[in-house]
Image (cartoon, helix red, strand yellow):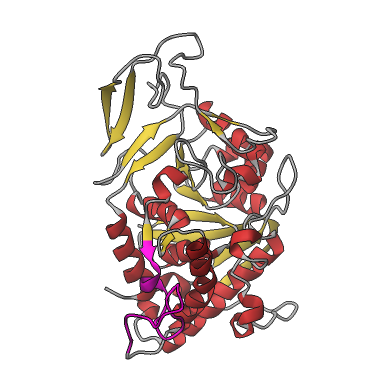
Amino acid sequence: MAQKIVVDTDPGVDDVLAILMALASPELDVALISIVFGNTHAPVAHANLLKIYHLLAQELAEIPDAEARYARLAQPNKTVLALGEDRPIGGEKAVAAYFHGMDGLSNISETHPHFTPPELEPGATHQHLEISQKSSYEAILDLLRDEPEHTVTIVALGPLTNIAHALRAEPTTFARVHSVVWMGGALEHPGNTSPTSEFNCFADPFAAQQVLDACKAGQFELIMAPLDITTPHQVPFDDLIHPELVSGPDGSVPARKSDTPPSPLRAFISAMLVRVRGLQASFGLDDAMEMHDPVAVWWALAQASRPVLDLAEGWELQPREFKIERVGELTRGMCVVDRRGTGDEGETRTKSERLVGGQKKKEEEEGKGRMGDEIVKSGNLPKVIVKTPGKEVLRKTLLERVFGEA
């Protein structure tokens, strides 16, 4: 049986790829898509989700094997779509328009208006979605209340604002969750919004700390995919952008040609990634898309229907102790790791503990006075993904499932 999941998201360019991979994975049953502010404003992100489904409907109509790949859309119980929070719990609001464009999708609302679906008439139903009138956090709680305990996984791809509101409203109901998987934070890796902070953590550090505190209190398992693990997982733009639609990052003619025109989804994603490719070239980065949000979905599908800490082959977790800076002038959203080698009680910690394939493995630190990989006194610390089966496996999984390509 497929694992029921909530995708809490702020689409967002890489969110689109993650959402499509979730919908194209038979291991997962996307029961609810809850929208939060982040890469753009929440109402705009809600409209972006409708764009995704508009292109999915075209894909199913035009591509023979698409219906089999996206079988979730044919199920009688539609995925619920709920609009959530448009402001953080605390602090000033920030959105990532600098990278994702004002519409969150590289400004394709203006450059490619044909990707925008017509507005639903009042009272009309959506072909593939049940559009909820409830807030995202209420829809999350409804699902957790209705489903058997510890059977629903929340995959959070944006700020944790919706999650924190649900936790605040009904902590006992929220504790029925199987686990929360969050693409967020940066522990050893530089930030992507500030020198020290990853965007999802920066956008609502108060919500992130609240969820972190609840995890440490033993209310649920929190699995994190921080920049440390997501940034190295890259897929070349040549694999994602159809060669007929764009030249290389330097304006050159594409090295490869195609005898087949782009499918609706391929055209949609190509249009989004043209701007991203140019931005990354201007920053001197690799000619590849960093798979931040897809890594979180990949974890969820790899672990579907397994106990939380019974790891699939090739995955490793590291329990980590840290706190999140909420009000720092220069460090808002920073994951603050105590590297002095002392614990809360002044103890020197000299061992680390990893979870490898469901087994705990202790390792001696090379020296005292460092706390890069802390020993875990309690099983309640967040578990950070530190190893995956590799970026080539992710590339193959994404291309096969989203586009039907080997």
Image quarter in which the N terminus is found:
bottom left
| Residue 152 image position (x, y, % from top left) | 47, 49
Q: Is residue 256 magenta?
A: yes
| Residue 80 image position (x, y, % from top left) | 58, 63
> Which residue: 45% across, 82% down?
59
Left or right, 405 with respect to 182, comes to left
> Which residue: 60% across, 51% down?
140
Stretch of the chain drawn in magenta: 235-258
| Residue 95 image position (x, y, % from top left) | 67, 55
Numbered disc total: 0
Q: Is residue 385 magenta?
A: no
Residue 123 vertical placement versus 135 (above, below): below
> Which residue: 34% across, 69% down?
399
> Which residue: 44% across, 47% down?
151
Image quarter in which the C terminus is found:
bottom left
The one nearer the camera, 351 or 78, is 351
| Residue 224 image position (x, y, % from top left) | 46, 41
Q: Tell me where residue 378 sits by quadrant.
A: top left
Is residue 225 visible in the rendered image? The answer is no
Q: Tell me where residue 131 sits by quadrant.
A: bottom right
